[in-house]
Image (cartoon, rainbow, N blue to C red):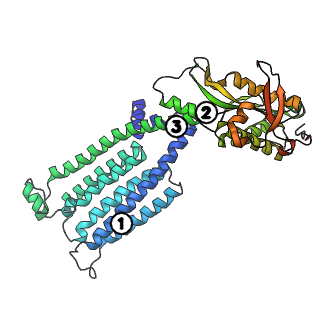
Amino acid sequence: MRYKLRRIRNRLSGSDLTANLPERVQDTINARQDASEILIGWVQFAFIVTMAVLYAVSPKAFTEDTMFAPVPWAIVAYLAFTVTRLVLAYRRRLPRALLLVSVILDMTLLMGLIFTFHIQYQQPPSFYLKSPTLLYVFIFIAIRALRFDPAYVVLSGAVAALGWLALLAYAVAMAPESAGITRDYAEYLTSNRILLGAEFDKIISILTVTIVLWIGIGRAQSQLVEAVSEQSTGRELARFLPREIVDRVRRSSTRLEAGDCEASDATIMHIDIESFTRISERIAPTNLVAALNDYFAAVAEPIERHGGVICQFQGDAILASFNVPRVDPAHASSALAAAREILELVAKRGFGDDVVFDVRIGINSGRVVGGLVGTPTQVGYTVHGNDVNLAARLEQLNKDTGTRLLVSESTRRLAGENAAGLVPAGEFEIRGQSQKTRAYTLPARAIPGANGKRRTRESGR
């Protein structure tokens, strides 16, 4: 029995859907709920301002200088409460307990405002039962749906139903003979008589709207959780796969499998750290990993800003592609611009605990195949082809030529004017290539740090 009651309570509050969500997903949902509370606050503010304007322009049935008027005080009290709640919503200081209390206060103040009408206009209590202000009860219940949490809708509807029932009971108990209970509908409409059936219809309507919204919000909440989870998963996947591939997975009507690929003209960049093995022998592993991660983050920025996509981190090496999977017609120029920035960046700063790295870069353009590789249960994205291998060979050739950057003839030709400043480095026989490869580089004066060996600081030894 206790288990069933707990299940009902969880169903009413929607906690079944959010109980086992990852923290990052829950944080995203909470942020959206906080934004919803701000919207709810403004809706309530608009409501109370509207009420104040309507009261100000409506005719009064009393002399204001001789009688206490409770309606303005009720409006002022509710306005103060609404402004306070709105300020707290902007400051993200509305815990769940306070929100629940605010729902009760919202409806209580509205019922209190309706209650004061018979005092304001010197009528029997049954007078307020015909007040059109009751319609605002449905607005108050409806705006709670903005939070996508059924608990607040249920609470708001329950308080409204109980509040109207209390007003009805008071009106019946305090009714004079001229304003008692009647069964005549016409008399009910034209006098202060009370028609119990009509009042119960109002309560039934409040409860019906509450139940319908509860069911609808329950379904909407599940869709919200699913959407936020999918977006969060997409952001996490983007750390392992290019954003374009993640978007393709989302849009695909079928499941993408290892082997799904596309051929495209592209420019490939291969970057490696010079003498990384020697550096790793001199630096504590934790410091080395910190320096390497800092280096990866710094180098990734110009690559991505120039339209490139990092396909792989291979030890200390980086394999990046331009024009696949992210389209870039000027891919050769973009790769050269990124390479120049990387050389300048690496020459200016250290990484991690001020560890200095020197890098070698090889760039080549040609026809490549980009796609998913792996097993049926685990895949990754990479690029393949002879032109990919040539970029790696050019990077390695820097060791023999004493250069930091080697660019193939195809890349220089495609880059056009943007290849200005490149000078011939020679023709080379490269393993795996049937013909000699003509390569270009930047003159030593144009490459930061090329005129002298920099010494790596042996941090964390």
Callout 3 crowding tier (Cα within 10 Å): few <14, some 14–19, many ≥20: some
In the rendered image of this protein, does residue 61 appear above or below residue 99?
A: below
Question: Where residue 87 sits: x, y (%)?
Answer: 49, 61
Callout 1 crowding tier (Cα within 10 Å): few <14, some 14–19, many ≥20: some
Q: Is residue 318 visible?
A: no
Task: Using residue 108 as the reference point, say whether residue 185 is left or right of it.
Answer: left
Q: Are marks 1 and 3 in contact (CB under 8 Å)?
A: no
Question: Where residue 305 sits: x, y (%)?
Answer: 66, 43
Q: Which residue is mark 2?
A: 242
- What quarter of the picture does the N terminus occupy? top left
In the rendered image of this protein, does residue 345 appear above or below residue 378?
A: below
* 1 or 2: mark nearer the eye: 2
Task: Using residue 78 as the reference point, say whether residue 436 is left or right of it.
Answer: right
The local secondary structure at tag 3 comes to helix
Q: Are marks 1 and 2 in contact (CB under 8 Å)?
A: no
Residue 291 quadrant: top right
Q: Are marks 3 and 2 in contact (CB under 8 Å)?
A: no
Residue 383 quadrant: top right
Residue 190 quadrant: bottom left
Q: Nearer the viewer, residue 47 or 246?
A: 246
